[in-house]
Image: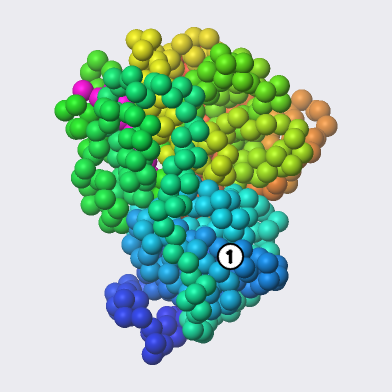
C-alpha cells in the first residue's frame, strides 16, 4: 500500500529532523495512525492548509510548510519582480511550532528572492491582514489553526487586499503548491537574510492607531464603570487587547492572568474555542470575584470572540448570532443618531447566519447581502464595492463568532470586536440595561429568531468518505419535509441552482460553487448542511422564527432532532 511506502520513505530519510523522527517511532506502533498520516498529501485548499502537527504527508510539519511556501513562491515569481519586491507579511499565533513554521516560510521565500516581513512574536490574524495593506505587501501568511484543538496548526494565505485569497487566485496557488513536488525532497537553498525583515513596534502602533477609529463614542471609555473580564485563551491577542483598552481609557478591565501568556498547549482549557462554555471556566471565576458585567474570550489567533453576560444567578453565554445582532443595533443606532448612515450602506453576513441581523439593519435603512460561509467572501465583497462604489461597507459578520467593524483589516477582527462590545455594553449600562436586556428588546421588536448548530466528527479515510456519501445521497434523495414541515425550496450551491416544490422554474444562484445545500421550509424556518472546511466534520445549521421564545425553542428542537436522524442514516451507509 502506498501509505506504507511513504512511511518507509520518511523513516529512511537520513536528513529527517529529530522531532519528526521521534514522531515516526510513535506512529509505527499503530497501523491506523500510520495510514492516516500518509494516506494522502495534506490538502492545500482555497484558504491554505490546516491539519494535525506531526510527521507525514497528511500532517503539518517543516516539510509540508516548506512545500506550501515553495508553491507560493512560484506563484509570486510568476507575478513578476514588483510582486517579489513587495513581498509577503508573515505572522503566527501561539500554537506549537508556530515560530518555527513561520521562520521556515520566511526562509523559503527569501531563498526564492522574495522579501518576507516577519513578526517575531505572536500576533493576531487581523493584525496580519492589516499589515499586508499597511505595508503594501503582495501577500500574507499566518501560521494558525484558529480555535482547533492543540494538536492542530495551519498555513493561511492572504492576498494584497488583506483578505483571504479569492477562489480564482486560490486555485492558481493550489496548482503551484501541488506542482512543488515531494515535500521531503524540496531543497532549501541558502536564503538571502537581507530579504527577511523583522517587524517591530512601529507596526503594532499603526494597528493600535487604526483600532481607535472603531470607537463611536470615545468619551464612554473615560466615564464608564463597566466591569469587564477578558481572556485571550492563551492566544495571540492578550497584549494587543490590554494595550488598546488601556490607551482609550477603560479602567475596570480584569484579565485572566492564568491565560494571558501565549501557550500552544492551552494548559487551562479543554478547548480554546470561545463558542464553547468550557472556555469561560476561568473567566467566570474572575467574573464572580470582581462582580463583572460581561466576560470576553478570544480564540488563539484573535479573530473570533465570545461573550457572557451577568444575570441574577449566573453568566449567560451569547451565541455568535446574538452578539452580531447587538453590535449591529449599537453601531447603526449610533450612526443614525449622528446622521452618519450612508444611503448605500451595506451589512454582510453568511448564508448560515441569522436573519435577525438583516432585519435590524433594515430597521435603520441599511441593506444586507448574504455570501457563502467563510469570511473571505465578505472580504471579496468589500474589495468589489470599494472599486465600484455601489455600496459602502458598514459591518460584516458570521454566526461562528467573527465580526468586522472597520475594513482596515479584511478578515474578522476580534480586537476590533472587543473594543466595540465593551463600548456597547458601557453605553447600555448607562441606560441601566445589560446586553441581554438589549437582546430581549430586539426580539420583541423583530421576532424571536433562534438558531442552532450540530456538528458530527468523522475522522480519517472512512470519515471523509462518509461525509461525501451523505452529501451525494441528499442530492439524490431529495428531502421534502423536516419535522413535518414542507420544504418549499432548496438551494444547492455546488450546482448553483435554486429549486422549488410548487412547480416554479429553477433559478440560478449567483454565488461561487460550494458543497452546501440549504432548505427553506413553509413556516419560514431553514436548514443548511455543509462539510467543515477546516475540520473532519459535517455541520447542520438551523434557523427558526416565531412570536415567542418558547415556541422558537420548541421548533428548533424538533428540526434538529428530525434532521439529524435523517442524516444519520446516510452517515451509516
Q: Is residue 490 left or right of residue 229?
A: right
- Looking at the image, is 523 positioned above or below residue 445? below
- The segment highlighted magenta reads 291-299
| Callout 1 secondary element | loop
- Looking at the image, is 305 positioned above or below residue 46? above
Does the segment drawn in magenta span residue 381? no
Viewer-proximal residue among 460 and 286: 286
* Residue pictured at 71% horizontal, 38% vertical: 385
* Residue pictured at 33% horizontal, 46% vertical: 239
Q: Position of residue 521 (x, y in %)?
A: 63, 25
Q: Is residue 267 left or right of residue 347?
A: left
Does the segment drawn in magenta span residue 295? yes
- Quarter-of-image position of residue 7: bottom left
Viewer-proximal residue among 284 and 249: 249
Residue extending furthest right?
A: 505
- Looking at the image, is 391 positioned above or below residue 234? above
* Residue pictured at 57% horizontal, 31% vertical: 395
Q: Position of residue 484 (x, y in %)?
A: 57, 23
Residue 445 in sight = yes
Residue 452 in sight = no
* Residue pictured at 31% horizontal, 76% vertical: 19
Q: Position of residue 238 (x, y in %)?
A: 32, 45
Which residue is labeled 1 in the image?
A: 87
Viewer-proximal residue among 113 and 518: 113
Q: Position of residue 95 (x, y in %)?
A: 35, 58
- Looking at the image, is 368 positioned above or below residue 110? above
Residue extending furthest left?
A: 289
Amino acid at each position: 500500500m502506498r501509505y506504507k511506502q511513504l512511511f518507509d520513505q520518511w523513516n529512511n530519510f537520513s536528513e529527517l529532523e529529530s522531532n519528526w523522527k521521534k514522531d515516526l517511532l510513535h506512529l509505527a506502533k499503530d497501523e491506523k495512525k500510520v495510514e492516516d498520516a500518509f494516506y494522502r498529501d495534506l490538502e492545500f485548499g482555497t484558504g491554505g492548509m490546516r491539519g494535525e502537527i506531526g510527521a507525514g504527508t497528511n500532517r503539518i510539519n517543516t516539510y509540508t510548510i516548506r512545500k506550501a511556501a515553495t508553491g507560493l513562491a512560484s506563484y509570486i515569481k510568476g507575478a513578476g519582480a514588483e510582486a517579489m519586491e513587495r513581498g509577503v507579511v508573515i505572522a503566527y499565533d501561539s500554537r506549537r511550532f508556530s515560530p518555527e513554521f513561520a521562520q521556515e516560510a520566511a526562509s523559503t521565500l527569501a531563498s526564492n528572492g522574495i522579501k518576507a516581513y516577519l513578526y517575531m512574536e505572536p500576533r493576531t490574524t487581523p493584525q496580519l491582514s492589516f499589515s499586508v495593506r499597511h505595508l503594501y505587501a503582495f501577500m500574507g501568511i499566518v501560521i494558525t489553526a484558529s480555535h482547533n484543538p492543540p494538536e492542530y496548526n495551519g498555513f493561511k494565505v492572504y492576498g494584497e487586499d488583506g483578505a483571504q485569497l479569492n477562489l480564482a487566485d486560490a486555485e492558481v496557488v493550489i496548482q503551484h503548491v501541488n506542482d512543488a513536488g515531494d515535500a521531503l525532497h524540496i531543497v532549501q537553498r541558502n536564503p538571502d537574510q537581507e530579504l527577511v525583515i523583522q517587524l517591530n513596534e512601529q507596526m503594532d502602533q499603526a494597528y493600535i492607531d487604526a483600532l481607535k477609529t472603531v470607537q463611536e463614542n470615545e468619551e464612554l471609555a473615560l466615564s464608564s464603570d463597566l466591569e469587564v473580564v477578558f481572556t485571550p485563551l492563551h492566544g495571540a491577542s492578550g497584549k494587543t487587547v490590554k494595550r488598546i483598552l488601556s490607551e482609550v481609557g477603560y479602567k475596570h478591565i480584569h484579565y485572566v492572568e492564568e491565560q494571558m501568556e501565549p501557550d500552544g498547549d492551552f494548559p487551562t482549557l479543554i478547548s480554546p474555542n470561545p463558542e464553547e462554555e468550557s472556555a469561560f471556566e476561568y473567566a467566570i471565576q474572575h467574573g464572580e470575584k470582581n462582580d463583572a458585567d460581561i466576560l470576553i474570550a478570544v480564540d488563539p489567533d484573535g479573530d473570533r470572540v465570545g461573550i457572557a453576560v451577568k444575570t441574577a444567578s449566573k453568566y449567560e453565554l451569547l451565541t455568535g448570532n446574538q452578539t452580531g445582532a447587538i453590535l449591529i443595533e449599537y453601531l447603526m443606532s449610533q450612526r443614525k443618531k449622528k446622521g452618519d448612515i450612508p444611503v448605500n450602506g451595506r451589512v454582510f453576513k453568511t448564508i448560515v447566519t441569522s436573519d435577525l441581523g438583516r432585519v435590524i439593519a433594515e430597521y435603520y435603512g441599511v441593506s444586507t447581502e448574504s455570501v457563502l460561509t467563510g469570511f473571505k467572501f465578505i472580504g471579496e465583497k468589500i474589495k468589489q464595492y470599494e472599486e465600484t462604489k455601489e455600496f459602502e461597507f458598514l459591518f460584516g459578520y458570521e454566526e461562528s463568532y467573527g465580526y468586522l467593524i472597520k475594513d482596515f483589516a479584511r478578515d474578522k477582527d476580534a480586537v476590533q470586536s472587543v473594543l466595540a462590545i465593551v463600548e456597547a455594553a458601557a453605553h447600555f449600562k448607562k441606560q441601566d440595561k445589560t446586553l441581554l436586556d438589549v437582546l430581549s428588546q430586539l426580539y420583541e421588536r423583530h421576532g424571536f429568531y433562534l438558531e442552532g448548530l450540530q456538528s458530527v466528527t468523522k475522522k480519517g479515510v472512512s470519515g471523509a468518505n462518509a461525509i461525501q456519501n451523505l452529501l451525494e445521497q441528499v442530492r439524490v434523495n431529495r428531502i421534502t419535509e423536516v419535522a413535518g414541515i414542507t420544504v418549499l425550496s432548496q438551494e444547492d450551491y455546488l450546482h448553483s441552482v435554486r429549486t422549488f416544490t410548487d412547480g416554479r422554474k429553477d433559478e440560478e444562484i449567483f454565488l461561487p460553487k460550494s458543497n452546501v445545500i440549504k432548505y427553506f421550509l413553509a413556516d419560514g424556518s431553514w436548514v443548511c448542511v455543509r462539510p467543515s472546511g477546516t475540520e473532519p466534520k459535517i455541520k447542520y445549521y438551523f434557523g427558526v422564527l416565531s412570536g415567542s421564545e418558547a415556541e422558537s425553542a420548541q421548533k428548533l428542537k424538533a428540526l434538529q432532532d428530525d434532521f439529524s436522524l435523517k442524516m444519520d442514516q446516510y452517515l451509516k451507509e
